[in-house]
Each structure stands twice: as C-alpha cells, then as structure tokens.
Amino acid sequence: QVQLVESGGGSVQAGGSLRLSCAASKHTYSRYCMGWFRRAPGNEREGVALIGSDDITRYVDSVKGRFTVSKDNAKNTLYLQMNSLTPEDTAMYYCALAPGWPCLLHPSRFGYWGQGTQVTVSS
C-alpha cells in the first residue's frame, strides 16, 4: 500500500506561481509512473502531468510551457511547479502513482491517490 500526501496548494492571483508537493511512502516498485491530476467543480478529473521512474514526462496541452513536473527520489517526493497561473487552473489537485508501465496520463491507469490540495487562482 502506497500513501500519498499533497501539500502546497493555496490562493494566488492570475500570473502567479505555486509549487505542489506530494510525499509518497516508500514502495518497492522499480518501474512506476507518478502523476498530477485535477478536478474543477462540475468537471471530470483531468490529467495534468506525469513523470515516470525513467524520468520521462508528459503534459496536457493546456499546461505545456507553464507547469513542470519533477521528483526527488531520495525524498520520495513528487513536485509540480506551476507558473503563469490562470483562473482556469483553479481545481483540486491530486497526485497519484501507477505501478509498472505504460505511463499514460489517464486516471484509470493509477491505483494510488492522495487526498488532494486546493488551488484557487483569482483574476
């Protein structure tokens, strides 16, 4: 069982930045994918970014060039640096882990989820 705990959410004005963190409990998966997803009110959960154990990354088109996903293996921590935030980025953000391959940015691929952290961007 893998536990994931997000932090770093908050309220910012448009154009601002936030960095989300996701602390993961230790696990034994040699191949895995870690991702960030978000859900805005009235919308379905949307894949934002992922990073594989081989450091391959994927982003949804709407955040390319603004968000950067990274991980610190020594700290078992996943990050999402979010720059140039817009009100459309307002959502609950979740981190997730998928054992094995392939790394697909779709919720159904991920079996472990955190509780989420709220990001609110005002205009």
Image (cartoon, rainbow, N blue to C red):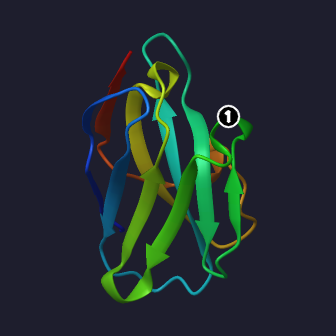
- Check disc 1 and give the amino acid type: Ser
Q: Is residue 15 left or right of residue 11?
A: right
The reply to whether residue 110 is in sight is no
Q: Nearer the viewer, residue 4 or 36?
A: 36
The reply to whether residue 109 is in sight is yes
Of the 4 image quadrants, the one containing the C terminus is top left
Q: In which quarter of the image is residue 10?
A: top left
Residue 102 image point, x, y percent: 76, 65
Residue 38 image point, x, y percent: 48, 35
User: Residue placed at 55% from the left, 50% from the top?
Assistant: 67
User: Residue placed at 51% from the left, 69% from the top?
Assistant: 70
Q: In this view, does 98 lie to the left or right of 89?
A: right
Of the 4 image quadrants, the one containing the N terminus is bottom left
Q: Which of 87 and 49 is in front in this view?
A: 87
Say above or below: 90 vs 123. Answer: below
Residue under label 1, please give it. 62
Q: Which of 55 and 67 is in front in this view?
A: 67
Element under label 1?
A: helix
Work out which residue is located at the far top of the displayed protein and give it.
42
Query: Callout 1: 10 Å neighbours few (<14), some, many (20+)?
Result: few
Q: In which quarter of the image is residue 55?
A: bottom right
Q: In this view, does 60 lie to the left or right of 85?
A: right
Q: Is residue 95 left or right of residue 12?
A: right
